[in-house]
Image: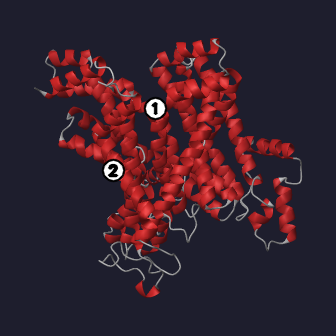
Amino acid sequence: MTQYIARRVISLIPVLLGVSIIVFSLIRMIPGDPVTVMLGERARLEDIERVREEMGFNRPIHEQYIEWMGRILRGDLGTSIINRTPVMDELRSRLAATIELVVAAMIIGLIIGISVGIISAIKQNSWIDLTATVGVLLGVSMPIYWLALILMYALAVNRQIFPPSARLDVHLDVTRHTGFMLIDTLLMGDMSLFLNALWHLILPAFVLSTTVMPILARMTRSSMLEVLRQDYVRTADAKGLRRRTVVIQHALKNALLPVITIVGLQLGGLLGGALLTETIFSWPGMGLWTYRAILSRDYPIVQGAVLVSATIYVVVNLLVDISYAYVDPRIRYQSQ
Amino acid sequence: MSTTANAQVAALNEIMVPGQSRSLMSDAWRRLLSSWNGRVGLVMITITILIGVLAPVVWPYDPYTDSNLAESRMSPSLQHPFGTDRLGRDMLRRIVHGTRVSLLIGFVVVFASGAVGILLGLFAGYFGKAVDSVIMRLMDILLAFPAILLAIAIVAVRGPSLENTMIAVGVVSVPGYARVVRSIVLSVRERDYIDAARMIGVSHGRIMFVHILPNSLSPIIVQMTLGVGSAILFAAALGFLGLGVQPPIPEWGAMISDAIPFLRQSPYLVFFPGMAIMLTVLGFNLLGDGLRDALDPQLRK
């Protein structure tokens, strides 16, 4: 196991190095002078000089990269062009907001997706199964921002059941410890604040969950159908166990293993979907931040956010692989 | 005679009667038409393509002369079945012309990224060793980015336009093809007829393109069909963010984001372009699923 983990971690290094090179090159691939592009045509000459000096554009490219990499390893992602504040400062609260949204979406997606998958498998070819199949097909084909707007119209604009934006009502304030609204409001011991935060989370999280829900439902259904055909399920049935016991205790456990593996693979989709969801619900996370930075050509923020997202994605996938290899020892030997 | 018995006789005929055998492709085609998702997908895509082709004839549209501020944001009516937008342009015409843009992006992206991905996958799988490590490591790096983020970053650097939308969506699609092709090549490479070809001195290029590639086509076709749908979905997301196809070209994603300020009063402006995206992508997804069932020998009963 240790050997497997070591091998996987080592294989990560070239990938992360490549990611850093791409992110590093991004600004330098802007046609024309990147500093002029960032500051605009009418920027003062001394500002242009200052930013150029700051970003090290005057030096040879490999020196620039080594210097940039060194700063990143020390946890310095550079300075925002517009706010003049360190990118790292804002990153923390942004990251917490996105993680809260993504985790909530994953939980909703897992609960609904897996339940629908199980029911479709047990009642194969029933009208429930048919509805679920159609729902899955529509779900994969649907643009998430469109669903977000439709739900927003129906539930937040036309009828004001849910708030249309932000993480908390404007007049409310929370002392931030962790950056996770649900945890911070609980730490303050104020139930109404917690419910307010939860209320703001539900709609965006549900919208985001639809990026994973159909895939989870489909996987669960086919995996469950496969398992239900196995001999040990027939044995359990033959022993006279209740159907519910057979399904939940015997079949489900084995059926869920392949479903769990794809959870890690879905993270990329979730992070991408989070960007679209956040722009619509004004959710102050990484996605909205990156998007606004792109529009305002604040490239240090774009670099930092893209680098961090990619690193998280790669690391989480590694953790999923490792945990899967832990559960299923065959994996460790197969990939040798 | 029962239907199963009929099927058995038909299957027997297939084997026994010479001259009646069908080619692999016509066989697959028949199975595609017998599956419901393949049939529905095929019909939906045919209609979509017809709409796209006939658009200039049946629903002529000019983004400039069609705008009429006196008819700004009219609700759906007989004259304007999908209503009119902020500038008084007929939404039906805009959406119909958006079909052309989306289909163009979908097909161009799939052919370009498919070609690149197939080549990379072939080389990686066939030559193995260092070639394989280098190519697949590069693909891993591209896959390390959440796809939308990478596409946005590319557009942010190159500037938003139709061409850059295709480039961005194309780049993020390449690793998928490379992976699929490589994995098939790895298994096809070990077959006896490849060894035989190598032994009689057939060149690497000929082995790859004449012997391996044609025998790896099924999964590639499925992947490319599904790829058209995801490319359209992707390009629309870029358009929605204002980083894709630019006005005055009518593009579905951009239509949706244009309509956001009027969500309360004119929700139909959001509704119809989104339906267009969903139905088009659905068509390709259904066809892809149908093809997978039809082409996968392991699923054959």
What's the chain of the residue with tag 1? Answer: B
Picture quarter containing residue B178? top right
In this image, A61 relative to A202: left or right? right
Q: Which residue is mark 1?
A: B218
Count how many numbered circles sit on residues in the image.
Answer: 2
Q: How is the image coloured?
A: secondary structure
In percent of width and height, residue A51 lies at 82, 61
Image point 20% across, 22% down: which residue? B9
Most extreme residue toward the bottom is: B70
Say whether residue B210 is left or right of residue A70.
Answer: left
For the C terminus of chain A, give its image quadrant.
top right
Tell me the distance, in whole angstroms, between the alpha carbons under discs 1 and 2: 21 Å
Q: Residue furthest right?
A: A59
Nearer the observer, A184 or B112: B112
Q: Position of residue A151 (x, y in %)?
A: 36, 61
Quadrant of residue A190 in the image?
Answer: bottom left
Coordinates of residue B163 in the picture (x, y in percent): 62, 57
Q: Is residue A300 above or below residue B123?
A: below
Q: Which residue is mark 2?
A: B43
Q: Secondary structure at mark 2?
A: helix
Tell me which amino acid carries mark 1.
Ser
Residues flagged by tags 1 and 2 on a common chain: yes
Does residue A78 appear in the picture of this structure? yes
Q: Chain under label 2? A: B
Label 2 sits on what residue type? Val
